[in-house]
Every structure is written in structure tokens, then in C-alpha cells.
Image: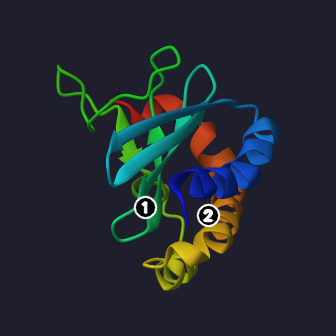
Amino acid sequence: MEIEDIKRQIRDVFDPLAKNLGLQGPYESTLSHTQLSIAYCNDSIGIELSIDLSDFFIYALLYKPVGDQVPIGYQDRSGCRHKLYLQEALKELSIEFSKETKMLQKLGGNYKNCGEMALALSSFIGKHWESVNAQPGRWFK
């Protein structure tokens, strides 16, 4: 499967979800030859899909938008957090997510599961978006 096919499968699932959640984008970038990013955001919070092509897995991260840019790294120059994994935020909210994590782990490791993993992850994000979006300032300290 070509990289463009992977991005298309992911965007086919996430573009409509992002629109429903009131997010702008997508903003695509290639981070390395084995990692790419597709991101969506509103004025105060964004969701980045970090796609690891070497082990094939799609990670969901929350981030603090800077215009239409996705920050690199997890902290800014002053040491303040500006990006974190969705699961970290859910832990802080005491929300259980082990069932979803196990499902995603089963789908990982094989790019042929790209569409199915994108659907599972979009369901996971959609289910918890209201909780994490309600307090965007909480995540970026």
C-alpha cells in the first residue's frame, strides 16, 4: 500500500469527523520517511494523528494550535506542555479506555488494517472529544 493510499483511507474517516467536531484542517506533514501527521484543530485545541509507518500504528495526540501549525515535541521552549497523547488526557479525567486500547493494539502492526484502525480510532475520539475539548486550557500548562 502506498503512503498516499494510507493518507486517503485515514482522511476518508477523519475529515467528516473533524467537520462534525467543528475542527479545521486537515494539515498534513511528513515528519520522517517512516512517520507522517494529519491534524485538525479549532482555536484552542487540536487533534494530531501521528502515523508510524514502520510498525504501522496511528496515534492520537492533543495539541495547542499555533495558527495552522502543529507543534513539534511535547513541550515548548519554556517547558510548558503543548502536546500529549489522548490517553494521557483521559487518564487525567479518570476515564476508562482499556477496551479501546486493546482493540487498537490488535489492529496495529499491519498497514492492511489501516481503514479499520482509522474507524476504531475515530470512534474512540468521537466518544471522548466532548470531555477533552471542554477544558482545553487544562492540557497545556
Q: Residue at x 45, y 35 (%)?
A: 29
For marks 1 and 2 on the same chain, the one whose residue lies earlier in the sequence: 1
Instruction: Report the side of 17 relative to 91 (left or right).
Output: right
Q: Which mark is residue 51?
A: none
The secondary structure type at the circle numbered 1 is helix
Considering depth in this image, is 47 or 12 the residue closer to the camera? 12
Q: Residue at x 59, y 76 (%)?
A: 113
Amino acid type, label 1 = Lys
Q: Is residue 100 above or below residue 94?
A: below
List the single residue furthest toward the top. 67
Q: Badge 1, how many Cα within 10 Å: few under 14, some, many 20+? A: few
Q: Is the N terminus in the top left, top right, bottom left or bottom right quadrant?
A: bottom right
Q: Badge 2, how many Cα within 10 Å: few under 14, some, many 20+? A: many
Give how far across and how far down residue 19 sits, in percent: 79, 36
Give how far across and how far down residue 25 sits, in percent: 65, 29
> Which residue bears the numbered disc 1?
91
Q: Which mark is residue 121?
A: 2
Instruction: Report the side of 29 relative to 14 (left or right).
Output: left
Q: Are marks 1 and 2 in contact (CB under 8 Å)?
A: no
Occupied quadrant, residue 121:
bottom right
Q: Is residue 50 above or below residue 2?
A: above
Marks 1 and 2 sit apart, C-alpha to C-alpha, by: 17 Å
Q: Is the C terminus in the top left, top right, bottom left or bottom right quadrant?
A: top left
Q: Residue at x 35, y 31 (%)?
A: 82
Mark 1 or 2: the one toward you: 2
Considering depth in this image, is 96 or 110 the residue closer to the camera? 110
Q: Residue at x 37, y 45 (%)?
A: 84
Give how far across and how far down residue 78 sits, in percent: 17, 20
The secondary structure type at the circle numbered 2 is helix
Instruction: Report the side of 79 relative to 71 (left or right).
Output: left
Q: Is residue 55 above or below residue 128?
A: below
Give how far across and how far down residue 31 sits, in percent: 34, 40
